[in-house]
Image (tube, rainbow, N blue to C red):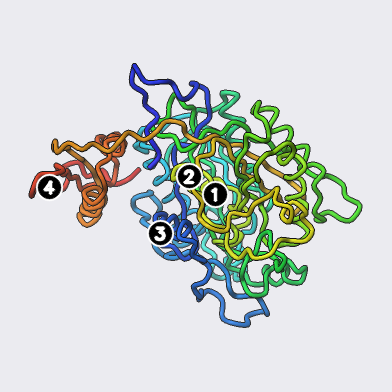
């Protein structure tokens, strides 16, 4: 768990008040029931796409049917989010997952979601295709009107703002696979200029229409065997995947928890290219990297790791990596570490940039870079892979680096780049004493509150985590009608009960 941001009077100050920090993360990832399962598979080096999916029958439309699929899309607690049953059925599963994951990201940040009601918090959602809207539009006889509220892209961010009563800017954007990193840059800029006090950054992708995959296949953009092989000579395109991922950004002075500091984020576009509108180029990527570094006032050699946008496209990967080499590898005395989460979970397209952010901050927190899969021999278009200036992390690697970069490239040439600084505050050592400690919690059901308390009781002692938990659950959360506590290290010292306050709705 990332350490708390709170500093005691005598402790050193690790952040400036106006630093932009990532304080909460959550999401739904393919073939994973929980965020914890995703983390385990990521660091274990599991191919998350290895499991067969059952969304598309084999051979349908001639599409490659091996894709990353989200689990449990039909499950949604509509009462908790104050969504009418008629609307809940028509609500795009991406919105359902974003509501749940936004709530989880707030809690992960140590924030009671109720405390944010009326706050100047923005919501920026990156999305591209809207397959659920296409499905409802295909048959006018089943339309009842709620689809307009449930599937339009306008409502992707606005539904989050409505459900949590957030008053800041709320909008969706689309720049292809760079979308959620572009959204991250918008968040960074709004916070840096004081426009807002916090930002929910979301990236969402849900693959329902196999015909869109066929379109990409016709352009040789999809890996025939459903494996993404970034940096490798055998790369034949990307593997497509679902994902819904959230990051919550705040000023450091308001944060209760810090995963990493965003020291710079910038975007640009390649513009005209003689070869065509989607031909990969790297001229503007080179300029973008330099601009981001200049704003952060750090030297390229200070960056130890780059989370790449590479997906297995030979030319596109090469253009990005050669730009990285041009800027980041000059005067470097040791190899620059690189990786790509797309090898582990596929390309979640508009969500892929924020997936790269999540992977990077988890690596910072754990001080270990998870492996990039399917890398055996270097892409011959990238000389730096052959001569050792770039080193693909294809095995879990201990890492205590200070700076990392995350890069994203959209299909139309819209680039995004972010520089992150690891949390320098060390976790407090686990207490060795046997003093009993009180842990409190609340939940929707009795089984849920017992699950929470079981989890806490099974963890190593962590007073910082108990503090975050108290900050979330000491005040009422509407809909949490069960409350409970446990006194750690005391036998049979647990109690749960139904709260007298039966406020069910946000």
The residue pinned by badge 3 equals 37
Closer to us: 57 or 168: 57
Mark 4 surroundings: few (<14), some (14-19) or many (≥20) residues within 10 A: some
**Marks 3/4: CA distance?**
27 Å
What residue appears at the point 37 percent right and 55 percent down from the top-left corner?
78
Mark 1 vs 3: CB contact within 8 A: no
Looking at the rendered structure, the secondary structure element under dot 4 is strand
List x then y, in percent, for residue 349. 63, 56
Closer to the chain start, of discs 3 and 2, is 3
List x then y, in percent, for residue 336. 65, 45
* Tag shown at residue 494: 4
**Marks 2/1: CA distance?**
7 Å
* Tag shown at residue 156: 1
Which residue appears farthest toward the bottom when viewing the image?
Answer: 59
Mark 3 surroundings: few (<14), some (14-19) or many (≥20) residues within 10 A: few
* Tag shown at residue 160: 2
């Amino acid at each position: 768990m990332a350490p708390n941001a709170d500093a005691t009077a005598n402790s050193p100050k690790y952040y400036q008040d106006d630093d932009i920090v990532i304080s909460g993360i959550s999401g739904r990832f393919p073939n994973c029931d929980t965020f914890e399962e995703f983390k385990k598979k990521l660091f274990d080096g599991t191919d998350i796409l290895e499991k067969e999916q059952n969304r598309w029958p084999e051979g349908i439309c001639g599409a490659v049917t091996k894709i990353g699929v989200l689990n449990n899309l039909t499950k949604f607690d509509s009462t908790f989010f104050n969504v009418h049953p008629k609307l809940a059925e028509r609500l795009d599963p991406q919105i359902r997952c974003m509501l749940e994951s936004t709530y989880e990201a707030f809690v992960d940040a140590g924030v009671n979601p109720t405390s944010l009601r009326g706050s100047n918090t923005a919501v920026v959602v990156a999305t591209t295709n809207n397959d659920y809207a296409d499905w409802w539009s295909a048959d006018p006889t089943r339309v009842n009107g709620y689809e307009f509220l449930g599937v339009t892209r306008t409502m992707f961010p606005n539904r989050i703002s409505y459900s949590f009563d957030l008053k800041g800017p709320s909008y969706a954007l689309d720049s292809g696979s760079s979308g959620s990193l572009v959204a991250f840059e918008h968040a960074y800029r709004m916070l840096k200029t004081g426009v807002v006090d916090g930002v929910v950054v979301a990236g969402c992708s849900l693959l329902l229409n196999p015909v869109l995959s066929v379109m990409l296949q016709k352009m040789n953009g999809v890996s025939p065997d459903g494996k993404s092989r970034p940096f490798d000579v055998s790369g034949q395109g990307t593997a497509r995947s679902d994902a819904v991922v959230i990051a919550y950004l705040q000023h450091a002075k308001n944060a209760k928890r810090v995963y990493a500091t965003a020291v710079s984020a910038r975007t640009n576009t390649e513009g005209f290219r003689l070869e065509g509108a989607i031909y990969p180029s790297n001229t503007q990527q080179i300029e973008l990297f330099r601009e981001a570094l200049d704003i952060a006032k750090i030297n390229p050699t200070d960056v130890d790791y780059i989370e790449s946008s590479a997906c297995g496209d030979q030319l596109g990967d090469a253009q990005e990596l050669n730009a990285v080499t041009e800027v980041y590898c000059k005067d470097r005395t040791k190899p620059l570490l690189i990786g790509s989460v797309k090898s582990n979970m596929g390309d979640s397209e508009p969500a892929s940039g924020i997936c790269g952010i999540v992977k990077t901050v988890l690596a910072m927190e754990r001080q270990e870079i998870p492996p990039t899969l399917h890398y055996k021999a270097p892409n011959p278009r990238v000389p730096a892979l052959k001569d050792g200036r770039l080193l693909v992390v294809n095995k879990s690697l201990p890492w205590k680096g200070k700076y990392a970069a995350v890069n994203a490239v959209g299909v139309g040439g819209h680039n995004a780049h972010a520089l992150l600084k690891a949390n320098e505050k060390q976790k407090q050592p686990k207490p060795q004493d046997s003093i009993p400690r009180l842990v409190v919690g609340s939940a929707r059901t009795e089984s849920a509150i017992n699950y929470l308390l079981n989890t806490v009781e099974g963890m190593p002692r962590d007073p910082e985590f108990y503090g975050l938990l108290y900050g979330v659950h000491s005040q009422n959360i509407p809909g949490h009608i069960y409350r409970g506590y446990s006194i750690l290290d005391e036998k049979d010292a647990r109690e749960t009960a139904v709260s007298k306050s039966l406020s069910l709705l946000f």
